Image (tube, rainbow, N blue to C red):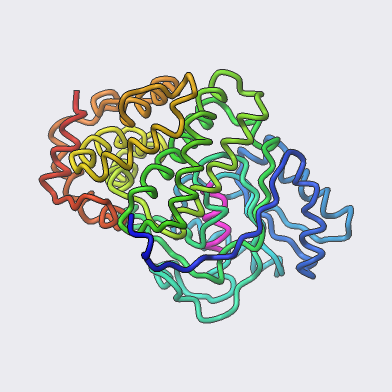
Amino acid sequence: MDILTEFQTVTKPQLIYGAGSLLKLPEVLEKLKVKKAFIVTDKGISQVGYPTKVKTLLEEKGFECFIYDGSCENPTETDAENCAVAARSFEPDVILGLGGGSSMDTAKACNFLYTNGGRMEDYHGYGKATKPMLPLICIPTTSGTGSECQSFALISRDSDHKKMACGDPKNAAEVAILDPELTLSQPKAVTANTGIDALAHAIETYVSLKATPYSRIYSAESFRLLAMGLPKVLREPDDIVARSAMLLGAAYAGIAIEHSMLGAAHGCANPITARFSMTHGQAVGLMLPPVIRRNSEDPVIHEDYQSLLLSVSGDEDCQFDSLDQLVENHLELANLPLRLSEVGISEDKVSELAEDAETQWTSSFNPVMLGERDFLDIYSRILE
């Protein structure tokens, strides 16, 4: 890695980390001098009771609150507009994203539409919001996307379900509250899917073409926390130390994404999610080992992967000869698929997936340049 590589840091968000840190939320809003909080979440989180807990916590301190729990997995343009309609009725001065990546993405998308108008496709790209935006507070309840540390909202087009990355520095969260106690309610399947997604973020950002010495610090520490924490959380869901490691690791990976980018595993996964409605983390996990093996054919990238592996070699759950072996082990522990045939994807679909994968924006940042034939080979390696 060239230590002379130029880069700029992003100071937001402020991280408030630790068990019970949710209780600091009123103090955060007081410092921002806001009064009306629009809470964006989903129905699953509502059933657990977290939005009501947040609303009660804030109302006891004199804040007005509205809970919008219509966030959906892989939010679309319509989902974003529905949220913005609710926000216009309430007229908030601060937006809270409470939940997993989809809730936080919906909150960010709402912020674009509520403050700047138009449609989500108007913000596809970076820095296209021309007016000020509301302060955003992110409170993740999963250890996955790291969306709390990114200024991008990932929104799917209504027409073809292709993801649009809509980013703006004004839409970065002011504060991310990382309270591991909020992740204890996750079902094992959610823990597995989000944990594997976060692990993929750490690995892909470490070798991304846009990686810098700064971003790689976060990628490496994220990988260390996630690779060692995920097996422990899967075995002992109430292990608050492991939960803390996972939550912090996911946030660090989010910082790494903000300063670098992802790669071909996400490029391969997005068409699967769009065409087969597969959970994002499951699709990314499925594609990560073959992409690692393909990238490892480059000796420089192979050494980068080995350095990650070396950082966790002292942990009994991480003693493997290669990075793809570690990932496959973690996928097996998480009861996630390793073959396309396991999820009903047949050989006749592979060419369509490869064609789509080549056009994905994340694929362009993969450290090894790949064409359609390369993607066809990657998918084919895990058919049976």
Residue at image x 59%, y 42%?
Answer: 248
- 222 left or right of 134 in image: left
Question: Number of numbered discs present?
Answer: 0
- 209 part of magenta stretch: no
Q: State whether the magenta stretch is mostly helix, strand or loop.
A: helix
Residue 142 in percent (x, y) is at 58, 39
Dividing the image into 4 quarters, which one contains the N terminus? bottom left
Quarter holding residue 180: top right
Quarter holding residue 301: top left
Residue at image x 72%, y 46%?
Answer: 51
Residue at image x 48%, y 45%?
Answer: 73
- 17 left or right of 305 in image: right
Quarter holding residue 95: bottom right
- 185 left or right of 19 in image: left
- 109 part of magenta stretch: yes
Residue at image x 23%, y 35%?
Answer: 293
Tell me: residue 93, above or below residue 275.
below
Dividing the image into 4 quarters, which one contains the C terminus? top left
Outermost residue to the bottom: 130
- 106 left or right of 219 in image: right
- Is 43 in front, or is 380? 380
- Is 316 in front, or is 58? 316
Residue 135 in percent (x, y) is at 66, 67
- Is 76 in front, or is 256? 256
Question: Which residue range is magenta in the image?
Answer: 101-110
Residue 343 in percent (x, y) is at 30, 27
Residue 298 in percent (x, y) is at 19, 43
Outermost residue to the left: 373
